[in-house]
C-alpha cells in the first residue's frame, strides 16, 4: 500500500519528507533520486498507535487569528504517543 508523502523544507532540519501512515506497524519509506534509491533507502519505520485526545494547543493565534498575518500558537504532542521523523540533509 502506498501513502502520499510530501517534500518539506525546514530551517531546523533541512530537507525532509512528511507523511501520515494509515496503519500501525512496520513501514518502509522509499526515497528515490533519478529513479535510484538514495543512501540507506528504503527507511524502516515502526508506527504505533497514538492518542489524539492528548494533544494540547494554546496561544493567541487560536483565540483570535487574522488572515494574512502571523498567528502564533503552540501545539504540544508529547503525551499523544511516539512520532517518527526522517530528515534528509
Image (cartoon, rainbow, N blue to C red):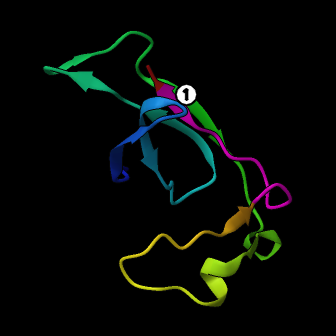
Q: Quadrant of the C terminus?
A: top left
Residue hosting label 1:
44
Residue 26: image x %, image y %? 60, 39
Residue at 75% x, 76% y is 58
Q: On the image, which quarter does residue 46 sit in?
A: top right
Residue 45: image x %, image y %? 59, 34
Membership of 80 in magenta stretch: yes
Q: Residue furthest front?
A: 69
Q: Is residue 72 left or right of residue 35?
A: right
Residue at 46% x, 86% y is 66
Q: For mark 1, does the 10 Å Cα neighbourhood hold few (<14), some (14 to 19), or many (20 or more) residues?
A: few
> Callout 1: helix, strand or loop?
strand
Q: Is residue 86 left or right of residue 36?
A: right
Residue 8: image x %, image y %? 37, 43
Prevalent SS, magenta region = loop
Q: On the image, which quarter does residue 10 sit in?
A: top left
**Vertical position of residue 80 compared to residue 66: above or below:** above
**Vertical position of residue 63 compared to residue 74: above or below:** below
Residue at 67% x, 80% y is 60
Q: On the image, which quarter does residue 88 sit in?
A: top left
Q: Residue furthest left?
A: 34
Residue at 26% x, 24% y is 32
Range drawn in magenta: 77-87
Amino acid at each position: 500500500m502506498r501513502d502520499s508523502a510530501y517534500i518539506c523544507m525546514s530551517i531546523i532540519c533541512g530537507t525532509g519528507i512528511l507523511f501520515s501512515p494509515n496503519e500501525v506497524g512496520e513501514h518502509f519509506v522509499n526515497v528515490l533520486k533519478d529513479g535510484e534509491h538514495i543512501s540507506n533507502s528504503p527507511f524502516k519505520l515502526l508506527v504505533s498507535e497514538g492518542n489524539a485526545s492528548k494533544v494540547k494547543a494554546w496561544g493567541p493565534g487560536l483565540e483570535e487569528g487574522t488572515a494574512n498575518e502571523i498567528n502564533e500558537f503552540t501545539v504540544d504532542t508529547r503525551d499523544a504517543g511516539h512520532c517518527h521523523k526522517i530528515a534528509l540533509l
